[in-house]
């Protein structure tokens, strides 16, 4: 971890740095406009629904600022803390994912929005989260914004209490259920609404895993990376806050959900966020244990690309497919008609949609069907083209069977662009063929 003591002790360099920093309008992680001032010494973060005490425990809210000195506690003592404040009795120590949501890495000494949280000590603050790799616990160093798993539990640190989120569960496990799998090498994290590439850059998505070795880049090169993966061209390097949202705090080596992000290197990953404490460093996340720290920009590290919040997307397509049969039981060599329908129940056009009906490989004779459909061994493929939101298209296929038994027929809808929910893309019917 880089330490900037020497840099900060030189007043000329410090003045130059602050002039450079003032000339750059970095977007804030925690702008005051994202919080509601409850007028009672608490603020509510609109993005997370978490309500925070504005003062560290031990300080007193005067109506305009925090007066006094923050108390310090060992980890075990901090876990037991509770208070009656502002009319609520359910205050508690935040977990490490929650505590990170108020880090402001465009500030340091302290790395927090001091308009919201005045007189915050330049110190580590305890979270409630134990570190699974050792008898340590997670904390945030609000001097510079580091997130560290190596805080010894006997250390004495300040705390800031929080009330449970009223709108969002910010847990530690990053379960697969938090991610929507688009089956094209991308997922959307429901908590953040960010779309991620499942593989590190340099690896190849095989349909089930990430093969190959992740490439490594300097910070400057990583910032320039682009991609047209899965039909999108707006992939970019994530901010450090976005990247840290993938950390899985209940495991390590790697500290990420390997079902969602298979074969992730246990390595430092670059974010796009510059480190304001030293212009030659930048922020990243170490996915062996989940620490958030800075490194020199000349180092070569892997990256994972992200797309802008899906909440900013105008719409998404969603195919739904149904299949019906004129009868579910029929003698050999008799005519049977299937009707397959594909609908776009989303709010964005489905591009190059297809409707595919899968039949048994043996014993099926195609008798008639739509002119634009092509029989290919055991499938009947019908191009649909662009399917507007709310639109549907159907195809009829007439067949006969020369083999007895029960057989399963499947209709599947596919498209070139991302489907917001693939669970409703297929439909099945069972037909019994008698003598």
Image (tube, rainbow, N blue to C red):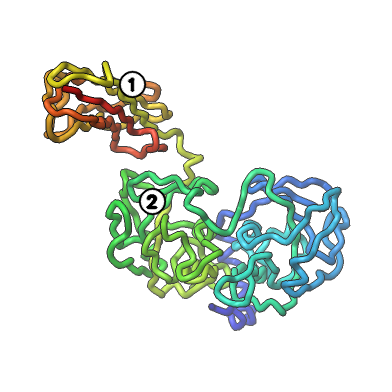
Sequence-earlier tag: 1 or 2: 2
Name the mark on residue 392. Answer: 1
Left or right, 395 with respect to 128, comes to: left
Residue at position x 14%, y 29% from top? 403
Left or right, 394 with respect to 97, comes to: left
> CA–CA distance between discs 1 and 2?
31 Å
- Res. 345 image quadrant: top left
Residue at position x 39%, y 25% from top? 389
The residue nearer to you, when weighing 217 against 107, is: 217
| Above or below 165: residue 313 | above
Query: What percent of the width, then of the height, locates residue 241?
Result: 54, 58
| Above or below 397: residue 30 | below
Query: What percent of the width, then of the height, locates residue 289?
Result: 51, 71
Left or right, 68 with respect to 409, comes to: right
- Dot 2 falls on a residue whose secondary structure is loop
- Dot 1 falls on a residue whose secondary structure is strand
Quadrant holding the C terminus = top left
Query: What percent of the width, then of the height, locates residue 39?
Result: 82, 47
**Front: mark 1 or 2:** 1
Left or right, 6 with respect to 215, comes to: right
Residue at position x 52%, y 56% from top? 174
Name the mark on residue 235. Answer: 2
Q: Residues within 10 Å of mark 1 (few under 14, many from 20)?
A: some
């Amino acid at each position: 971890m880089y330490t900037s003591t020497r840099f900060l002790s030189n007043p000329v360099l410090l003045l130059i740095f602050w002039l450079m920093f003032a000339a750059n309008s970095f977007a804030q992680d925690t702008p005051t406009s994202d919080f509601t001032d409850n007028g009672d010494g608490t603020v509510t973060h609109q993005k997370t629904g978490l309500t925070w005490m504005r003062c560290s425990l031990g300080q007193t809210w005067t109506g305009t600022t925090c007066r006094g000195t923050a108390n310090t506690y060992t980890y075990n003592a901090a876990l037991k803390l509770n208070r009656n404040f502002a009319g609520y009795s359910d205050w508690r120590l935040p977990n490490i994912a929650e505590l990170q949501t108020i880090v402001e890495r465009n500030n340091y000494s302290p790395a927090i929005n001091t308009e919201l949280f005045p007189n915050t000590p330049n110190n580590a603050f305890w979270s409630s989260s134990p570190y699974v790799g050792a008898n340590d616990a997670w904390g945030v160093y609000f001097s510079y914004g580091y997130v560290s798993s190596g805080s010894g539990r006997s250390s004495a640190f300040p705390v800031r209490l929080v009330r449970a989120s009223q709108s969002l569960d910010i847990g530690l496990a990053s379960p697969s259920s938090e991610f929507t799998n688009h089956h094209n090498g991308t997922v959307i994290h429901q908590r953040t609404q960010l779309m991620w590439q499942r593989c590190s850059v340099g690896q190849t998505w095989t349909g089930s895993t990430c093969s190959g070795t992740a490439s490594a880049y300097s910070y400057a090169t990583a910032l320039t990376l682009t991609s047209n993966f899965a039909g999108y061209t707006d992939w970019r390097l994530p901010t450090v806050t976005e990247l840290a949202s993938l950390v899985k705090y209940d495991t390590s080596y790697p500290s990420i959900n390997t079902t969602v992000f298979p074969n992730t290197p246990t390595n430092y990953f670059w974010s796009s966020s510059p480190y304001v404490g030293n212009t030659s460093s930048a922020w990243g996340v170490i996915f062996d244990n989940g620490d958030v720290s800075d490194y020199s920009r000349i180092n070569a590290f892997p990256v994972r690309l992200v797309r802008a919040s899906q909440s900013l997307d105008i719409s998404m397509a969603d195919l739904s497919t149904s299949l019906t049969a004129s009868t579910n039981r029929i003698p050999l060599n008799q005519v049977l008609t299937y009707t397959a329908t594909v609908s776009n129940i989303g709010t964005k056009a489905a591009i190059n949609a297809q409707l595919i009906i899968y039949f048994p490989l043996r014993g099926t004779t195609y008798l008639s069907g739509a002119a634009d459909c092509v029989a290919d061994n055991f499938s009947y493929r019908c191009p649909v083209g662009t399917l507007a939101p709310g639109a549907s298209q159907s195809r009829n296929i007439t067949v006969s069977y020369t083999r007895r038994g029960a057989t399963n027929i499947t209709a599947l809808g596919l498209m070139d662009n991302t489907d917001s929910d693939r669970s409703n893309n297929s439909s099945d019917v069972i037909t019994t063929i008698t003598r």
